[in-house]
């Protein structure tokens, strides 16, 4: 499977551009109708979506933000870092900038033990519910959590580790806004008192293998300041692809 090609195709759809434009070593400004849409899995639209790789910056914006983006485009150079671009945007636009890291899968590591990992089925819902309520003590699972669990477990994306019959680390699979038949992003949660035991690494790798076996490309994304998630991504075979800056106006 060509992970690079598929992942680039996915983010080109986010940006509203042709895949061949990615990795052309320049600053590109494009106006995309995708910027006015609230994408599946998100609560608001990203009116400016900036994709930053080495020596390339792609700024995808909505029509209503085009004038503002044009005013700052000349200040942005292709060799700039995400930090430098974020400062320019924050000063000029005076709105908070969302920051995340996007990853591309590289290869399956051979040094991670997954023998303690269980693939969850419908019968594990009560354990999943207990896990959810432990993590979100004021959460409201009524009306959505059971259906969500059955959906992702029947698709084969839920892997967990148990300690003393208690679910302590588990994957999930967020809805994908594009290319649902080709890609699947991975989510992972571990109860705080069970972290640093390698459980997240084991269940995540099991989920990655299942995604690949289904003919899909695994994806990973995390906020810029989530160093634990970033380290986990590298440990299970991902490499950094791009920094992304987002904002809604």
Image (cartoon, grey):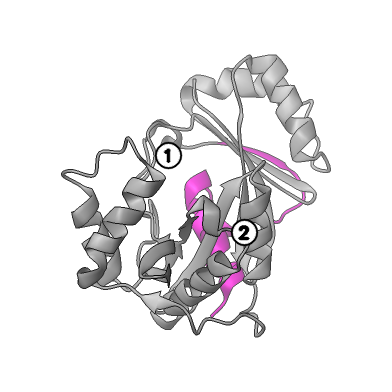
Residue 62 is marked as none
Q: Is residue 11 magenta?
A: yes
Residue 107 is situated, as x and y percent measured from the top left of the image, at 64, 78
Q: Where is residue 228 drawn, in percent x and y?
A: 65, 53
Residue 108 horizontal/vertical position (percent): 61, 80
Residue 16 in sight: no
* Residue found at x 24% / y 44%: 141
- Quadrant of res 3: bottom right
| 88 left or right of 47 in image | right
Please give the residue where the numbered disc 2 appears in the rendered image: 103
The stretch of residues the image draws in magenta is 1-30
Is residue 16 shown above or below 72?
below
State which tag comes first along the sequence, 2 or 1: 1
How many marks do you count on the picture? Answer: 2
The stretch drawn in magenta includes residue 21? yes
Circle 1 crowding by C-alpha within 10 Å: few under 14, some 14–19, many from 20: many
Q: Which mark is residue 34?
A: 1
Q: In screen coordinates, is 228 left or right of 116?
A: right
- Tag 1's secondary structure? helix
Give neighbour class at mark 2: few <14, some 14-19, many 20+ (Cα, 10 Å).
many
Residue farthest along the left direction in this orientation: 143
């Amino acid at each position: 499977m060509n992970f690079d090609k598929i992942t680039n195709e996915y983010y080109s759809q986010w940006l509203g551009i042709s895949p061949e434009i990615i990795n052309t070593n320049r600053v590109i400004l494009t106006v995309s109708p995708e910027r006015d849409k609230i994408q599946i899995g998100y609560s608001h639209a990203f009116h400016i979506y900036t994709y930053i790789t080495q020596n390339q910056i792609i700024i995808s914006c909505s029509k209503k933000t085009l004038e503002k983006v044009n005013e700052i485009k000349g200040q942005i150079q292709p060799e700039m870092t995400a930090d430098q671009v974020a400062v320019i945007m924050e000063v000029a636009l005076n709105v908070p900038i969302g920051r995340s890291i996007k990853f591309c899968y590289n290869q399956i590591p051979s040094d991670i033990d997954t023998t303690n990992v269980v693939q969850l089925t419908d019968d594990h819902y009560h354990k999943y519910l207990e896990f959810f309520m432990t993590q979100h003590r004021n959460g409201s699972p009524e009306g959505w959590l059971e259906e969500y669990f059955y959906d992702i477990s029947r698709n084969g994306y839920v892997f967990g580790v148990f300690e003393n019959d208690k679910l302590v680390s588990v994957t999930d699979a967020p809805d994908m806004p594009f290319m649902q038949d080709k890609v699947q992003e991975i989510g992972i949660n571990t109860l705080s008192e069970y972290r640093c035991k390698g459980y997240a690494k084991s269940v995540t790798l099991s989920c990655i293998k299942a995604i690949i076996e289904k003919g899909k490309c695994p994806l990973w994304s995390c906020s810029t300041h989530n160093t634990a998630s970033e380290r986990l991504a590298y440990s299970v075979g991902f490499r950094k692809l791009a920094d992304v800056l987002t904002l809604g106006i």
